[in-house]
Structures are given as structure tokens and as C-alpha cells.
Amino acid sequence: MAKGLPHITVSVGRQSDDAQTTSDINLLSVGLGLYQAWMYLSIFGSGVIFMATKSPSLGEAIYASSFATQVFDAYFITVSLCLLLIAFTNQLLLRFFTSKSALLCATMLAVAGSVLAFLPAGEESAWLMAVGAGICMGIGSSLMIVLWGTAFARYEFTTIILNTAIALAIGVIVYFTFIQWMRTEFSCAIAAVCLIISALLLWKLAPMRSSATDEIPVFRPLPVQRSRFTMRVGIPTLLFGVVLGMLLFICIERVLANTRLSEQVIVGAAAIVSMGLIFVVSALISHEEAHWDMIFRILVPIVGLSLVAVPYLSGSWSLMAEFLVICGYICMQTLMWIFFSNLAQEFRLSPIFVFGLGNCIVSVGTIAGAYFGRIILECLMTQSAASLDLGVPLNVGDLVLVLLLALLLGYALLPRRREIRAIIVQGHNVEGAGAAIAELDGESAPAIEEGAPARPTEQPLVAVPTPGIPNAAALAEQQAEAAPPDHSDQQVVKHRFRDACEEVADRYLLSRRESEVMFLLAKGHNASYIQDKLCISRSTAKTHINHIYKKLDIHTQQELLNMVDETMDEAQSDAPTSTEEPDPKSIFAD
């Protein structure tokens, strides 16, 4: 995180083993929350706000509803196509995706789409303006999604959980405030201001390119087999997207559209309770259990309960049903963002690829889920069964059962960490990583690692190194100072040291944040320096250091320095003599 930005550190200690779970609440939550608020106001609120200053006739009300639906459809179709394109061109267009120009383009397109969505239009040009607004907002939103995903993927798991939960609660509350309590003709400007503030925060939070600084380089992402990854991650994501789309549509059309004070209170209470529940869950998860499977295990039953409550939206239990539906939507949306963030962070995958592909599939599922949501609302309003395109009559209970089965099937097909690791390991040098990583997973080591030396036990981990330890970085700097000044030679030395650190991080599958901490450790810095440099708490820095030592099967900082020294020596002895500069494209890794 950029220096000077405030953050709050939450630490939960355990007396049994003196372990701590730490997380930082920072401006990630505010920025993503304002982006969500812009999306809700512009995509779902355009038809409502268009009629804000009128007493609409029946024809005008139908026109407003149709306009909002056209914006919705054009937006999600555009987002799906753009995210798919971004995912599979993430390396080809990497310089653009990691530049400030991408953020500027995204902001301008999204603001232009918001203006189009709120401009008055005649019946002849309404559909053209609706489609144009949806396309502009879809292109801008797709870029914003991957940029926010890149910012989130730099943080540890519990930090991702807390900031995501707060962000979604902020988005729902801001939308509800400006749709129900402060609905004015200036809502277009309010939506644009939310997006601009979000973009400014993202400008500060986005990681710097390694061309700007070599103090904390952005390492190359680990490679994956795209076809296997797409199938393994895409199928459960699509099923979750259908559930999410249905909950989203019902929340917007049925729950948030109500004007009664009791239902307004229910919305605020649901947002706060959902956020508090996710806070408690993140506090109960230990560092060793911090991965997506644990959070899905806890929150999926809540989403299932919200689906069961849908048929009661029109009965005497409507307030309780609305409360559960809002909670279910926030939990489902939180789960998807956490899933993608954790995949990119823990395995150091390309966040542009993960968030692009993942959200593309979610968008496709959302379109299908919205179709189910429309049918369910029609059934609730008419108190009769609906007939799908196949001519099969279904009531609300049948549709909810289908969605509940999709949720359970999606959870059953959710990939495990070892399956993602197998997709990454194929064709990549991770020799020596099996025993330490399997120990953290609670699994047995792979067969190829049976001959690896056993990890010594009953030895304390040293979190804060001793000052003055010789290391590869210091020796390289001394040699560079003793030699005649040559800027190109110094750059080569820096790249060799960075490449050695990256080789160690790749070999042992360090996460994105762990790779940054390991790099600073290898330069001889202690936990206090790392805390200040990365803008994290001291306990968080120590936790990362201990986890790095476990994965690398070492116990002191000196052992890490020796490992980096040996890696540099091996690389130098194997590499042919060349004065060529490294490929700049490999430096600007996402």
C-alpha cells in the first residue's frame, strides 16, 4: 500500500500456541465500495432515478423499467466479452494493463456511460442510448475490475476478507441512500463522483512497476495450464454466478426498491450483520487455515438459507426473507471476490488473468441468474406457476430448488489447493517445495519429494534477523562499488539478485506478499523495516516471515541468505556470457 494512506490493524491472538491472526483494514475497502456503489447506481438505478422527479403514468413506468433492463443486458454482455479478451491477452497487452493509462481510460468510459444512462431520451432513441451506456460502462468496468483485483491480490487472506466485506456493505448502503432517501436529479453526478474517488484511491493503491523502483519488484506470475485451469475453476464459478445473479436481481427489483421505513431498516441491518459475520469468520480462521475452502465452508450455508427464504418474500415473513436475501447476496459476492483474490495472491498467479476469466464467467452466470430472478418475481406477483421456454410449468419452490442444487454442486466442484498447485507445477521448476507446502496443507508430500531431507523440529523460528549479516545483496553492492562505475553492470547485478529471489519464490510457491517479504529479508532487512516498507503491522510482518521459513524448510535469516547466494551462483555458472539486458516484458509482470 502506498505510504501515507491510513489503515487499521486487527490482531486475534491464541493462548494455546501464541499464534496471531492479523489483518489490515485500509482504503481498499472504501475504494472498492465506491466502485460497487457506482455500478449499482448506474446499472440498476438508472431507470428508477430517471422517474425520480415525475409522477409517472403506467406507460412511463414501463418505459423506465425497459430502459434499465436494456442497460443491464448491454452492460453484462460487454463486461463478459471484455473480461474474456483481457484474460487471454494479459501478457500481450501487459504494459497497458499495468499502466495509469488503463485506469484513466476506464474512468472516462465509465463516467461517459453513466451520463448516457441518466440523460433524458425519446422513445425512438432510448434503446440506442441504453445500449451505448451499457457498452461504455461495460468496457470501463472490466478494466476497473482487473485493476482492483491486482490491488487486492497483494494482500494476505484475512486482509482480503475484511476489506471485501466492508466494501460490499458500503456499496449497498450508498446505493440505498441515494435511491431511497436522497433521490434527486443529481444522482448522475453522485454516481460519477463515487467512481472518480474510487479511481483516485486505486491510483494510490496500485503496485508500482519494477521500472520505477527495484526496492520491491513485482515478480513474474507463475504459469498455469489455461485449459485445465479454466475448466477446473470455471465450472463452479459459473454455477455460483447463476446463484449470484438471481440474488442480485431480487435484491435490486424486490428488496431495495421498497420505500417502507421498516424495509429500509432491514437493508441496513442486513449489510451490517453480514459484515460483522464475515469479521467474526476471519478472526476465527488461523493463518494455516487461511484459504478459500474454509470461508466457503462457513458462508455457503448462509447463501443456501437465503435461497430457501425467497418463496417467503410475498408472505407474512417478508421482512425476515428480505433480510436473509440481502445477507445471502453480500456473502455470495464476497465469496467470489475472495476466491479470485486468494487464487492470485496465494499462488502468485496473474491477477489480470484470474480476475478477467473469473469475472467473465460470473457475468455469464449473472445473466442466466437474472432470468431466473425475473421468473421468480413474476410467480410471486401473480401467485401462479411460470412456464419456461421449454414449456415446463415451474413454481417458485421448483426454481429455488434448482438454484439450491446449483449452489451445492458448485461447492462440491470447488477446486482444492493441491489441484490448483498441480496445474501450476506442471512444466515449472518447483523441486524441493513438496514437503514444506504439504505440511501447511495438512496433506502428505508428493511422491517425488519422498527423498527430500526431513525438516528439523523443536527449533524456534527467528522472526527478526541479526543486523550486519552478510548476504548476496550486500556483497553484490560492495563488488559494484569496488569496480569502476558502470551503470549497466550495477543493473545486471540487481537483476541477478532479483532473479535469484524469484527463483526461490517460484521453487517453493511463495505467495505474492510472501515473495515481497522474502526479497526484503534477502537484502538483510528486519521485521521493523519490512513493516514500514510494506505498510503492514509488525505482527503481520512476523507472521509472513515465519510462514516463509516453514515453506522454505529453514529457521533463520542466514539460511535464507545462503539459499539466495547458492541460487545466484548456480544461475551465474549455468548462464552463457552475455551483456544483453533482460527482456523488459518479463520485468513488468502483473
Image (cartoon, rainbow, N blue to C red):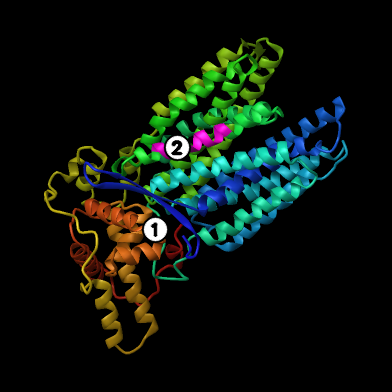
Please say whether residue 224 is visible from this viewpoint.
no
Compared to 355, does 380 lie above or below? above
Residue at position x 77%, y 35% in the image:
67
374 up-or-down from 28: above or below = above
Query: In this rendering, is residue 532 above or below 379?
Result: below
- Identify the disc placed on residue 278: 2
Amino acid marked by disc 2: Ile
Task: Specify the quadrant of the image occupied by residue 579.
Answer: bottom left
**Badge 1 density bin: few <14, some 14–19, many ≥20, Cα 10 Å:** many
Indicate the quadrant where residue 162 lies.
top left
Q: Position of residue 334 (x, y in %)?
A: 49, 38
Name which residue lies at 21% across and 74% down: 470
Asked if the stretch drawn in magenta spans residue 71, the answer is no
The answer to whether one can see residue 198 in this image is yes
Label 2 environment density (alpha carbons within 10 Å; few <14, some 14–19, many ≥20): many
The disc labelled 1 sits on which kind of residue?
Answer: Ile
Q: Which mark is residue 536?
A: 1
Residue at the location (65% across, 46% down)? 38
Left or right of 194, for residue 495: left
Query: Which span of residues is magenta-colored?
Result: 269-281
As drawn, is 56 to the left or to the right of 394? right
Q: Position of residue 160 (x, y in %)?
A: 44, 46
CA gap, disc 1 and disc 2: 21 Å
Spot the residue most to the bottom: 484
